[in-house]
Amino acid sequence: MLLSAFLSRRFRAQSGAKEAQNGFVTFIAKASTIGILLGVAVLIVALSVINGFEQQLVHRLLSVVPQVEYVAPSRPIEQWPAKVENLQKQAGVTGAAPFISVNGMAQYKSGLKAVEIRGVSPELEKNVSSINQFIQGKLISQMSTEEVILGSQIVDQLSLQQGDSVTLLIPQVNQTSNDILAPKRVTLTLAGIVKMGGPIDSSAAFIHLEKAQSLLGYNEQHVTGLRLKVNDVFYAHQIALRVGQTIPDYVYISSWFRTQGSLYQDIQMVRTIVYIVVFLIIAVASFNIVSSLVMEVREKQSNIAILKTMGAKDSTILATFVMQGLTQAFVGVVLGSLIGILLALNISSLFTWLSQLAGANPLEGVYFIEFLPSKLVWQDIIVTVIVTFALAVLATIYPAWQATRVDPAKVLGN
């Protein structure tokens, strides 16, 4: 192996010296190194961004949107305090809280905006939601019965400011004749603003649970739904089905997989596509290693013949050219990993700077975040390096084997 390493280094030195005369082989070798470098760097950055989106999905979006909900379709759920206490004792459940949800309109002066009015318990909501982290002004736990907390896009559209009086319109339907009645109107003070990014900012309107009960004519024991927080969000649906059997009321069972599952599936699909596409790029770069080594073997036939006449074994010749190809891959992997890690660690700041420079943020109002997240996972780097080296080894086997088939008599005779 030491002899093979020495010969490989000498062959590279000879190729460098002859580059001015025959630079095509060197160009192919450099192209394969650059291809591997770019492939490794792009894969590390892309996977880091995908991991960042998945992390933000779990720790940001899924900490606010309902992980599990039990919604009464017709009659309200009765005796909710006892049922919340029972749900909190179930395995896999870390928190439970009641809510009342109804669609309505927010009105300020001549402006109208459709909202989802959600009556929540200030004391229990913190057990199932981290929405307080994204509220400017009064938190839900500090909200009174005469106050409302709205999403930032609703506030902007209606030109509201904290402390303004906003009117909520709640539609009513005659339960007997199904006729639409005049909506109920209630005027509340804007106490807080939700600024999270994404759809919640454009639809959320939080009011006190007692206020929602009085508006809908419920007593203090009635709610329209129960909400859970679970210890593992990826098993939320299984927990929802199991725990739902303990609720005696007729309810619809819903988990975040129904409301946000498509987003999670999109993230996983993009991860798979990135793996396939980038590894194909690396495979093409590895094919360039085959081309460069085949030409290298043809160029070094006389050297190989002399080495064989001096007693060099086929295994030595094979290892020499395998090392030639692995050296190209090693340089590409090391430089690509360094560049990829550097970009992955700074991609969020770079994206913010470019957005400010362009004067527009392509993520704003589209996704649940307004920045480009990044999470560097070392396992991804290790897998990338191993697969790249495996492809490089496969690429060097055929040219190196061809080198062992050189016939000294024919080469030296010519």
Image (spheres, rainbow, N blue to C red):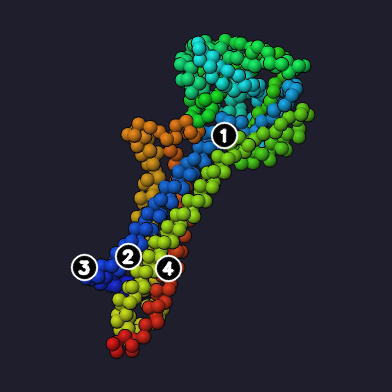
> At which x and y percent is residue 190?
52, 14
Disc 2 to disc 4, how far (Cα)? Answer: 14 Å
Answer with the quarter of the image where residue 393 lies. Answer: bottom left
Identify which amino acid the numbered label 2 is placed on. Ile
- Please give the name of the residue rendered at 51% of the width and 25% of the height, measured from the top-left corner: 201
Q: Secondary structure at mark 2?
A: helix
Residue 402 lies in what quarter of the image?
A: bottom left
- Of 175 and 268, nearer the camera is 175
> 130 or 77, which is in the foreground?
77
Q: Identity of the amino acid at label 4?
A: Ala
| 10 Å crowding of disc 1: few (<14), some (14-19), many (20+) | some
Comes first in the chain, label 4 or label 3: 3
The reply to whether callout 4 and callout 3 are in contact (CB within 8 Å) is no
Q: Are marks 1 and 4 in contact (CB under 8 Å)?
A: no
| Nearer to us in this view, 250 or 309 | 250
Residue neighbourhood size for the residue with mark 3, other residues' Cα within 10 Å, grouped as few (<14), some (14–19), many (≥20): few
Residue bearing mark 2: 28
**Quadrant in the picture for the N terminus:** bottom left
Q: Between marks 1 and 3, how big is the CA–CA gap? A: 60 Å
Residue position marked by numbered label 3 in the rendering? 20
Q: Which mark is residue 62?
A: 1
